Amino acid sequence: MGRERRLRGLDRLSERLVSVLLITFALVACRSEAPGAGDRSAVPAPGQELADAGSLTIVTLFQWKEVNDEAAALYQRGKYAQAEVMATRAIQLAERAFGPKALQTATSLNNLGTLLNRLGRYVEAEPLLLRSLRIREERLGMDHPLVGICLHNLALLLEDQARYPEAEAAIRRALAIAERASGAGQPDLALRLNVLASILRKRKRNADAEPLYLRALEIQEKAFGSEHPDVAISLNNLASYYNEQGQFDKAEPLYRRALEVWEVALGPDHPRLAASFGAIGDVFLQRGRLLEAEVLFKRALAIDQRISGPDHPDVATDLNNLGFLFLLQSRLEEAEEYLLLALAIRDKTLGPAHPDLLGTLTPLALVYRKTGRAQKAERLEQRAAAIRASGR
């Protein structure tokens, strides 16, 4: 899923962008925090962070801004390794120049935490996002738009970790802040509606999710027109919902619209394109168009491995999709190879009891059954049953 992407069983092959993939990587200027692509939160009054500059020269402030801007630009282009270097440098510069509880420090912490979450490094990301949230709450109050940005990103992290009640509480609070700050028709509200809908689906409340997706899409099309990358996020998320419901005739054209927008806006080698390829491949797989699905799954895998590295959760999703596809084609040796690779990544990045592991454990157990290895199959089936019983 989403930021946007995650499997929860044999019937859920490639739901990759239910979560917003690029929610907040805020560009920072003298006026507290300017919105970045993917998050259009309300901008506070100018001068707020300048209050933390003390006797420092304006040159120092702009040095810090330049580093943040470069980190954000690299993130937008999917160059995550370089973005991490710059985002880490921004924190060091902010703490040294402005202090550990300065608003500039909070912004830089938020940026690096968001990036690490995108890279699947959840344990490292959480304390950064929580620290940023605490600074902003203390300095700006509980209902400030910048607090809403922190809550938004924290909700995404909690969702990725299958901590759904906590994630829902965080995004509902962020949603309320956006409604008070910007009104009911603003783009930042649409992004948060997408996240809430994703979380509700994972909590098996599908009927509540569709109207949120439709409302988000309506807000964004009115604000930006039909060819904007943020509109593509809502198109992709709504398509994912229809795909999950088996409404493939509705899902495929929405997926294709989103892909066309992203190809123009982002170029041919961006993680969002990988997510789109995987999503459309899932529709093909559900419709029995297996050769077409394989081509798209392999394109997604190549992009994710190149951009995000070999151990990223999105790479695990791509491997898992291919493994299941090979299982359907009775290419059992290849199926086992890909599913084992996917399982190793998910164990490493998600932990041994995450619900997403069900989408790997179940088909891998079936491979073992088909190849006469009943004991191995039983061990995986028992592990899957324990995850289901945990109710996560």
Image (cartoon, rainbow, N blue to C red):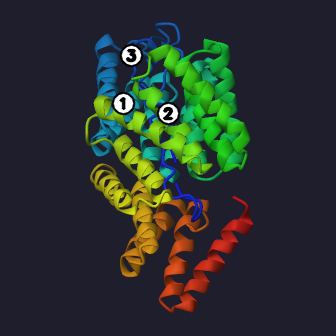
**Secondary structure of the residue carrying numbered label 3:** loop
**Secondary structure of the residue carrying numbered label 1:** helix
Q: Is residue 94 above or below residue 182?
A: below
Earlier-in-chain disc, 3 versus 1: 3
The image quarter containing residue 264 is: top left
Local crowd at mark 1 within 10 Å, few (<14), some, or many (≥20)?
Answer: many
CA distance for labels 1 and 2: 10 Å
Local crowd at mark 3 within 10 Å, few (<14), some, or many (≥20)?
Answer: many
Q: How many marks?
A: 3
Local crowd at mark 2 within 10 Å, few (<14), some, or many (≥20)?
Answer: many
Q: Position of residue 178 (x, y in %)?
A: 62, 20
- Nearer the observer, 116 or 140: 116
Which mark, by number, is residue 235?
A: 2
The C terminus - image quarter? bottom right
* Residue with the mark numbered 1: 261
Earlier-in-chain disc, 3 versus 2: 3
Q: Is residue 206 above or below residue 24?
A: below
**Secondary structure of the residue carrying numbered label 2:** helix
Q: Is residue 37 above or below residue 18?
A: above
Q: Which callout, 3 or 2, points to the residue nearer the camera?
A: 2
Q: Residue at x 66, y 18 (%)?
A: 179
* Residue with the mark numbered 3: 29
Name the amino acid type tagged 3.
Ala
The answer to whether residue 181 is seen in the rendering is: yes
Q: Are marks 1 and 2 in contact (CB under 8 Å)?
A: yes
Q: Which callout, 3 or 1, points to the residue nearer the camera?
A: 1
Q: Position of residue 350 (x, y in %)?
A: 53, 60
